[in-house]
């Protein structure tokens, strides 16, 4: 097709229109007016999401948290905007709009919103901003994240018991510390119950692409894996496992609903724990711009129900472990206590020493038992 | 490293290539028909999403994935009729109308799909080996252990090739895209026939969506086509508007996608960022080669593609 000037102008205006369409759609679908009950000033809480709320993944989990917040606190009115790109121009525009519209608290729920959040927060000192998964704070900006490696470790214990080929596949999105830490936590669990098993990692370079994630899982299954774990936002890898009669470990949501024969369990989030707590603190005037990193004991992370294919003794073992984490007897620091060797067999964490927050949050090496490279 | 390029590896990659390529292939064949008639439709992504959702909704309602596929076809056709009305009937800018369709399809499927997120389907298209043929050496595992929609695509490709190049109706179709004024002079109702091909193209895009939501990834997740509609549009150019080459292109794309994960899984030391880029790099290179000055004619781009037909402009 020859690109005429008319066509070009046409496509540009259509693109401009696309921005507007998305905003309107978010606006239409988003506002859920609460009936103010039991007194108290109505308070507006805004959420900014990176993907669609219907992804059954990361954003879905956050939106479940928003809905639970809405239900728990009737004088809260929540608004959200989904599929907001992580580039500064788009992210700042959306965050600023919510601040202008009178949101008292704004949650920005993806790593890429970190700098845009800090930038906008400067202009709105009266508004509380909370950024999920980042590390920058300001007078009115706090952060929040969770120790999902705790349930990932327990899911690894189960996977180690369930594999027969001793090969476990792990479909992973991007080689950032969050994902690497998850792979390591899972693998430490696998090797605890099955020192012979290895975890093979394949990178997809996408958070959200059902067909591609399924392809990656099939490649691992063809390579001999019989359990598929994932750090991805769609159930594609679990569906691949189900189609081959293999097992899997989901993520974000209970993926057992969509692949019931395959999914052993899924590490999941309960973001409402953090959201309700934060809103309550803001209402009470006790909110501080802290760096919150909640664990199983706080109820922020959890495991979805363990599937019926897991034998009774394995289930009992897992449930005992779950109790230890819930009571706080075990934590992420227990999981990451030495001796821990890296892939080359060299000791990285000495016996009896626990890794520090700083070491965990910047983790850029694989533990022994992981097969695959961390691309630089 | 030496275990990588075995026969078994290649068979697995090719089988995965065909499975992953079928959704793109249906959409690509549909777009090919519309473009052959002279109408560019950039709404493929939107039509695929609506098709994927309609397939899920109908399968949940009836328990029968074939009825789901039928609903996907109807939904895709319905979406395309909007484009037919705007771009053919009202002579609107085809680029703008198509983009609007993609945005509309994305938004509408998200809105209507909310209640279907995470629901398991009572039935879907699983692998069904063809008796006898599935046991052929090499060809069996590659071609004949696929899902039924893939078999449908095997039939569709030669049928459409024959239709476009060997039938009178195919000749008329090509005339619409090459010289609509000549077709008009022959007594063909240009706009009506073009609109029909746009609608048929949408039906195939809808089926392509269902190949994902009822085939490879049963169930609804918002935005689940993840850009495959755009790949389909690009592959039409690679295909030179020829259905047989469209199949080649779709399977090549699927093969590059499937192959890169297997190379990673086999421990081949190539950056996953580079491998992940390959399918798109491949598409861009094809587009660059295909749109070089002089290549346009050789590739057989319909001369009137993208141009609304108006009688007054004849001559």
Image (cartoon, rainbow, N blue to C red):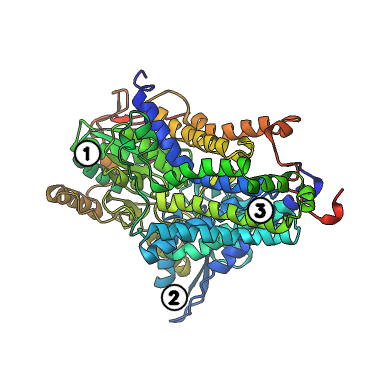
Q: CA distance from mark 3 to mark 1?
A: 47 Å
Q: Say whether marks 3 and 1 touch (CB < 8 Å).
A: no
Drawn side of residue A322 relative to residue B122, left or right:
left
Mark pair 3, 2: CA separation:
41 Å
C-beta proximity under 8 Å, tags 2 and 1: no
Q: Earlier in the sequence, mark 2 or mark 1?
A: 2
- State the SS at label 2: loop
Q: Is label 3 or label 1 in front?
A: 3
* Neighbourhood count class around disc 3 (C-alpha, 10 Å): few under 14, some 14–19, many 20 upward: many
- Tell whether A335 sits left or right of A120: left
Taking the spot 48% from the left edge, 37% from the top edge, the residue there is: B254
The residue depicted at 37 percent of the width and 44 percent of the height is A237
Q: In x, y percent, where is residue B191? A: 72, 57
Classify the position of the N terminus of chain B by image quarter: top left
Please, is residue B312 above or below residue B249 in the view?
below
> Are the numbered discs 3 and 1 placed on the same chain, yes or no?
no
Q: Which mark is residue A217?
A: none
In the rendered structure, the residue with mark 2 lies on which chain? A
Mark identifier at residue B99: 3
| Residue for badge 1 | A163
Name the residue at the top extreme: B2
Distance (Cα) linking label 2 and label 1: 47 Å
Residue with the mark numbered 2: A74
- Residue B71, percent across and down? 48, 61
- Looking at the image, which is closer to me, B137 or A11? B137
Q: Secondary structure at mark 3?
A: helix
Q: Mark 2 Cα within 10 Å, few/some/many (few <14, many 20+)?
A: some
Pick the residue in front: A62 or B27: B27
Question: Is any atom of residue B86 visible in this view?
Answer: yes
Where does residue B280 sit, x and y in percent of width and height? 56, 35
Whether pointer 3 and pointer 2 mark residues with C-beta atoms closer than 8 Å, the reply is no
User: For residue A149, what is the image quadrant?
Assistant: top left
């Amino acid at each position: 097709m020859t690109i005429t000037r008319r066509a070009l102008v046409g496509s540009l205006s259509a693109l401009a229109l696309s921005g507007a369409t998305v905003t309107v759609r978010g606006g239409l679908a988003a506002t859920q007016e609460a009936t103010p009950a039991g007194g108290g000033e109505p308070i507006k809480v805004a959420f900014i999401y990176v993907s669609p709320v219907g992804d059954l993944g990361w954003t879905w989990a956050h939106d479940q948290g928003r809905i639970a917040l809405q239900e728990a606190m009737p004088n809260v009115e929540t608004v959200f905007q989904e599929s907001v790109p992580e580039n500064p121009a788009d992210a700042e525009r959306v965050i600023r709009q919510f601040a202008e519209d009178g949101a008292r608290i704004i949650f920005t729920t993806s790593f890429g919103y970190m700098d845009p959040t800090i930038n906008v927060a400067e202009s709105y000192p009266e508004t509380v901003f909370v950024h999920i998964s980042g590390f920058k704070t300001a007078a009115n900006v706090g952060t929040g994240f969770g120790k999902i490696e705790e349930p990932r470790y327990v899911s690894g214990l189960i996977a180690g018991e369930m594999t027969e080929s001793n090969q476990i596949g792990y479909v992973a999105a991007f080689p950032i510390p969050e994902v690497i830490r998850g792979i390591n936590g899972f693998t430490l669990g696998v090797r605890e119950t099955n020192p012979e098993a290895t975890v093979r990692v394949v990178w997809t370079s996408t958070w959200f692409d059902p067909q591609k994630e399924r392809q990656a899982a099939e490649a691992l299954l063809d390579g001999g894996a019989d359990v598929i774990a994932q750090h991805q936002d769609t159930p594609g890898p679990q569906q691949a496992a189900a189609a081959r009669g293999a097992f899997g470990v989901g993520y974000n949501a209970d993926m057992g609903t969509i692949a019931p024969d395959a999914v052993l369990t899924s590490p999941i989030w309960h973001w409402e724990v953090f959201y309700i707590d934060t809103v309550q603190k803001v209402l009470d005037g006790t909110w501080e711009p802290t760096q919150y990193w909640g664990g199983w004991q706080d109820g922020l992370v959890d495991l979805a129900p363990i599937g019926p294919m897991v034998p009774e003794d394995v289930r009992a073992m897992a449930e005992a472990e779950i109790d230890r984490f819930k009571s706080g007897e075990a934590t992420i620091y227990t999981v990451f206590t030495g001796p821990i060797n890296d892939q080359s067999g060299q000791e990285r964490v000495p016996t009896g020493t626990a890794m520090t927050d700083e070491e965990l949050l910047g983790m850029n090496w694989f533990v022994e038992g992981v097969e695959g490279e961390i691309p630089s | 490293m030496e275990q990588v390029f075995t026969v078994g590896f290649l068979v697995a990659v090719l089988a995965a290539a065909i499975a992953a390529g079928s959704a793109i292939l249906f959409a690509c064949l549909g777009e090919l028909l519309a473009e052959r008639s002279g109408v560019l439709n950039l709404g493929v992504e939107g039509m695929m999403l609506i098709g994927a959702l309609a397939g899920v909704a109908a399968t949940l309602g009836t328990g029968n994935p074939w009825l789901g596929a039928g609903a996907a076809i109807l939904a895709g056709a319905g979406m395309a009729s909007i484009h037919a009305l705007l771009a053919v009937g009202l002579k609107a800018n085809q680029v703008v109308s198509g983009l609007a369709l993609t945005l509309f399809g994305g938004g509408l499927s998200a809105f209507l799909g909310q209640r279907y997120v995470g629901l398991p389907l009572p039935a879907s298209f699983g692998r069904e080996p063809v008796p006898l043929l599935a046991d052929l050496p090499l060809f069996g595992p590659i071609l004949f252990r696929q899902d039924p929609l893939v078999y449908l695509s095997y039939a569709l490709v030669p049928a459409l090739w024959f239709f476009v190049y060997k039938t009178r109706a195919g000749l008329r179709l090509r005339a619409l895209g090459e010289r609509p004024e000549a077709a008009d002079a022959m007594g063909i109702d240009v706009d009506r026939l073009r609109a029909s091909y746009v609608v048929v193209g949408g039906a195939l895009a809808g089926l392509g969506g269902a190949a994902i939501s009822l085939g490879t990834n049963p169930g609804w997740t918002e935005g689940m086509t993840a850009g495959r509609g755009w790949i389909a549009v690009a592959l039409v150019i690679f295909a030179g508007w020829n259905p047989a080459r469209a199949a080649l292109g779709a399977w090549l794309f699927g093969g590059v996608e499937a192959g890169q994960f297997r190379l990673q899984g086999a421990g081949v030391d190539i950056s996953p960022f580079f491998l992940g880029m390959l399918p798109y790099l491949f598409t861009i290179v094809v587009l660059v080669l295909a749109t070089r000055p002089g290549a346009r004619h050789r590739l057989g781009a319909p001369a009137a593609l993208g141009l609304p037909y108006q009688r007054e402009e004849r001559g």
